[in-house]
Image: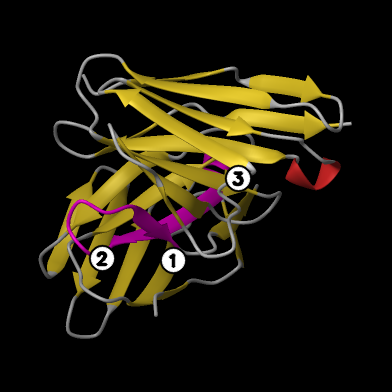
Amino acid sequence: GAVVSQHPSRVICKSGTSVKIECRSLDFQATTMFWYRQFPKQSLMLMATSNEGSKATYEQGVEKDKFLINHASLTLSTLTVTSAHPEDSSFYICSAIGVESYTFGSGTRLTVV
Amino acid sequence: GQNIDQPTEMTATEGAIVQINCTYQTSGFNGLFWYQQHAGEAPTFLSYNVLDGLEEKGRFSSFLSRSKGYSYLLLKELQMKDSASYLCAVIGQAGTALIFGKGTTLSVSS
C-alpha cells in the first residue's frame, strides 16, 4: 500500500514553455503532499507543501508564481513549472504521508533546452 | 534553523563494514529516516528511528541518540550494489515535510 504515482518520469521542453508534473496517491488519501527539487549530486530540497483545498506553502526562495502548485483533490497534486529556463532543469520529486510513513513518487527529470 | 550534517563522500571495500554518521539540529524532533538513493531514482526507505537505540534490519542498522542529536547508519558485508547516496532525513514538527541532509555518496570497490 501507500503508492504515489508521478508522471511524467522524463520531460524535455523548450525554454519559455510550461511543464506540468502530476503526483497521484493510488491507494490512500493525501491531504498533504510535499514537492522537492534535487540538483545533480545534491540532496533533496523542499520547495513547497501542498495542501488539499488550500494554497500551497512555499519555502523561502521558491517563486510561487513560477512553480504553480494545485492540490484540488485528496489524491492529486500538480506542479507546473511556468516559463521554464535551463536553470530549472532538475529532478523533481513529490512525497506524501501514507498510512504508515512517507512515500515518494518516482521523480521527474526535467530538461529545459 | 534546521541543520543536518553528514559526510559528503565515503569509500569502502566489498565485505567491509561502514558507518555513516548524521548530526542534526532541528526545531522539534519526531523521528529520523535513512534512505538510499541511486542516481536519477527516488529514495528508497532503509530505516526509521524515533526512540534512542539501535534498530537492526538485515545488513543495515541504524542508531539514534536524541540527547546528542546524532544518528548513524551501519552497513555490514558491503556489496558493490551498495554504492549509492545515503540520505539522513529528520521530521521536525509532526506532519511536516522531511528535511534532508546533503547525502553521503558511498563508493564500494572490489
Residue B39 visible in image: no
Height in image: B19 above or below A108? below
Q: Write down the chain letter for disc 2.
A: B
**Which residue is at 68% across, 21% downward?**
A10
Q: Which residue is mark 2?
A: B92
Estimate how packed mark 3 is, as few (under 14), some (14 to 19) or many (20 or more) residues with alpha carbons within 10 Å.
few
Could you tell which of marks 1 and 2 lies nearer the N-terminus?
Answer: 1
Drawn side of residue A83 relative to residue B47, left or right = right
Residue type at the position of mark 2: Gly
Residue A4: say if magenta. Answer: no
Gap in angstroms between the C-alphas marked 3 and 2: 27 Å
Task: Say yes or no: labels 1 and 3 on the same chain.
Answer: no
The boundaries of the magenta stretch are B79-100
Residue A30 position, x and y percent, is: 24, 29
Instruction: Determine the secondary structure under disc 3.
Output: loop
SS of the residue at dot 1?
strand
Residue displayed at 65% across by 47% down: B110
For discs 1 and 2, the disc positioned in front in the rendered view = 2
The nearer-to-camera label among 3 and 2 is: 3
> Which chain is home to disc 3?
A
Residue A68 picture location, percent across and down: 55, 37
Identify the residue position indicated by label 3 in the image: A65
Quadrant showing the N terminus of chain B: bottom left
Is the residue under label 2 in contact with that under label 1 (CB below 8 Å)? Answer: no
Q: Is residue B92 magenta?
A: yes
* Residue B97 vertical position relative to residue A54 in the rendered view, above or below: below
Mark 3 and mark 1 in contact (Cβ < 8 Å)? no
Identify which amino acid the numbered label 3 is placed on.
Answer: Asp
Q: Give the quadrant of residue B12.
A: bottom right
Q: Position of residue A63 (x, y in %)?
A: 61, 53
- Give the quadrant of residue A54: top left
Q: Which element type, helix, strand or loop, lies under badge 2?
A: loop
